[in-house]
Amino acid sequence: MKLNKAFATVALAGAVAAMSAPAMARDTISIVGSSTVYPFATVVAERFGSNTEFSTPKMESTGSGGGMKIFCQGIGTQNPDITNASRRMKASEFELCQSNGVKDIVEFRIGSDGIVIASSKEAEHMDLTLEQLFLALGEKVPQNGKWVANPNKTWSDVDSSLPNKPIRVMGPPPTSGTRDSFNELALEGGCDELPEAASLSKDEHKAICQSIREDGAFIEAGENDNLIVQKLIGDKDMYGVFGYSFLEENGDRLQAASLNGVEPTQENIAEDKYPVARSLFFYVKKAHVGVVPGIVEYASEFVSPRAMGSNGYLKDVGLIIPTRAALMELQDKVENMPNLTLEELK
Amino acid sequence: MTDHTSQAELVRRSLKRRYRKERRFRAYGIMAIAIALTALITLFTDIVGKGYTGFLKTTVTLEVTMDPDLMYLDDPTDSKQVRMADFVSPLVAAVDDALPGATADDQDALRRLINPYASTELRDALIENPEWMGTTRTMSFLVHSNVDVYVKHKGDAAYSIKLTEQQQSWVDELRERGLIETGFNDVFFTNGDSRDPAKAGVLGAIVGSLLTMIITLVLAFPIGVAAAIYLEEFAPRNRLTDFIEVNINNLAAVPSIIFGLLGLAIFINLFGMPRSVPVVGGLVLTLMTLPTIIISSRAAIKSVPPSVREAAEGIGASKMQVVLHHVLPLALPGMLTGSIIGMAQALGETAPLLLIGMVAFIVEVPEGFFDAATVLPVQVFLWAGSPELAFIERASAAIMVLLAFLMTMNAMAIWLRKRLERRW
């Protein structure tokens, strides 16, 4: 009988623990979203936690799309307060948010991420168009109206103005986010400039325009971008694809090709002139401001000069910081918290 | 008669072949064990070889002068002043003083030798001891993670890539003078997660795992045992109980991510429980471990000899008395073993926790069942995916901690069985 009673008590305690969980107050900011923004946002979160009385926000890396879905699930402390994104919120996602009662959203554009095509400083400087880049690296290219396996062996095969050197490019593996962006922005961007791409169906378009050649011209170098840098310094015929921060760190030894006539510089990437750049964002749920403590303070830490200024700690981890004017605008945004509208996203 | 002899003869002739066959059969068994052992040893040596350095930390001893002018700070008890003060400059100045060869242009390179959070340590120390202002004290700080791996893996070019040659020679110099030292990494066991490898620890994950496991044990064990007793001792044998039995066996084979989906849909979306908390994690893992516990508990109850039940019934015990006084105590070791194995499995799960938000960057050590938490295998997963070199050894070290937990649990299962088991 004793055993029986003990069981009953334990079971009851368990049931009570399980049921007594109404949407309870939360004092930790909950953040979801992009894995590209994650390494920057976690640094801010940790600094925020150690420099203020607020507790350190908790952050899930769910991907931009996954983050939007969870963020837009509704109001209430069981839902996250902030979502990070490596692209802008889509109109459809905004509508999902609206229909779930998440009416007031504030958008912060926190800087950019650029991808460069670099080589040793001793090599000839290249001025590529996205179209030429696709013709050099795409798996299939159009020839006489048909898509054939890429026959181009040297850069001069692609365009006679380019150096007569074999096409050899080192880049990140498919698991990397940099590779995703490179495929989407550089290759697909170049592919779209070809007249033949217009007649492709949606599936074919994605399959052809985002495929990189696998015949040895493109060399997968693993996630270690430092290794690519080492190789480029040793071999001046080799080109490498990596994030802008590595170019900046090794600026005394490496140079980058300009794309569509634009050099990858801090300013050009921050102002969106460089074609292979994307902006990073985070979105704040205004209804949670004042309910969950510290949201405004977190946002203000993120856009403070000590984080995003020219000597800020986010620059140390490789973020391309916004221009001074853009940073001032961001700080105004933290104060006024203007709502995002559907018109802005269309 | 002749027929008979020839058969005996046949048997004798085939004996040799049959012995050979048996020897071969045994050899296959030994080979299977050898393969398993080799795999295990390779795995262990790899993890231990990569990870033992994770249990070491590198510190630098500096003569820090708390100069009020340099720090823009007169009174460390004034929180407003503290917020605006500069705690980095005195540290850089201290490194500069320790290295006579450094010049004014090297400030940035010098700053990158010390841990980015050393300034926070200095701030906290000053807030606690305001009388230190204006004095010079010998203090010990963590080094930057790039220096940490460089010191630990001396001579391996892959680990020196992040430091300039100038920085490397500074580190070597400080090391020769005994100012940079390597010691036991207590930070690893007293801190939660961090984006800085030198400051990252497993305590948050260990506590998160414990809280989650407590919920799982408290719910899964009684429910599992009660279900097993009812099905085995009281339930009539009919189509319904057969159906239930088949479904319990099916549940045991369901991929764990499905339980995560269920947890997301029911506990979070329907009941409105918060994300990333041990309670929800525990509930999800309860669902996952229940079938294992029910199946092993039923097997344990079945193995109690019927004579025990019959004897008890023979002297007039009721059905409930038979179960509680005789069957349950005898079946308990088996039930406990099954439960502990089920719990050990749950301890190593990450997939179901992904969807309920326990795969997250959480710095603070959880203090209760409703605090955001993560668990050990998730911590391994997060560190293994981090770009910093120093996180590789931290991940391997965390694997060793997780393995230690699993081994303790399995040892406990064996001990309990040995202790409680009764043989016939």
Image: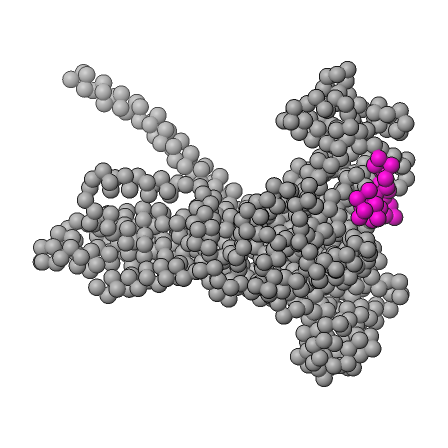
Q: From this view, report whether residue B103 is shown above or below residue A70.
A: below
| Residue B375 in view, yes or no | no
- Residue A263 among those drawn in magenta: yes
**Which residues, given as a range, are shown in magenta?**
A251-273
Answer left or right for B224 relative to A307.
left
Question: What residue do we see at 70% from left, 53% from top?
Answer: A108
Q: Who is closer to the viewer here, A65 or B153?
A: A65
Question: What residue do we see at 44% from left, 60% from top?
Answer: A22
Answer left or right for B174 relative to B320.
right
Image quarter of residue A306: bottom right
Q: From this view, report whether residue B35 is shown above or below residue B138.
A: above
Question: What residue do we see at 45% from left, 47% from top?
Answer: B265
Quarter containing the N terminus of chain A: bottom left
Q: Position of residue B382 (x, y in %)?
A: 59, 51
Answer left or right for B295 relative to B139.
left
Answer left or right for B309 relative to B26.
left
Question: What residue do we see at 17% from left, 59% from top?
Answer: B321
Q: Position of residue B120 (x, y in %)?
A: 70, 69
Q: Position of residue B113 (x, y in %)?
A: 77, 62
Q: From this view, report whether residue B140 is shown above or below residue B377.
A: below
Image quarter of residue A187: top right
Image quarter of residue A298: bottom right
- Residue B102 among those drawn in magenta: no
Quarter containing the C terminus of chain A: top right
Q: From this view, report whether residue A215 is shown above or below residue A92.
A: above
| Residue B241 in view, yes or no | yes
Q: How many marks?
A: 0
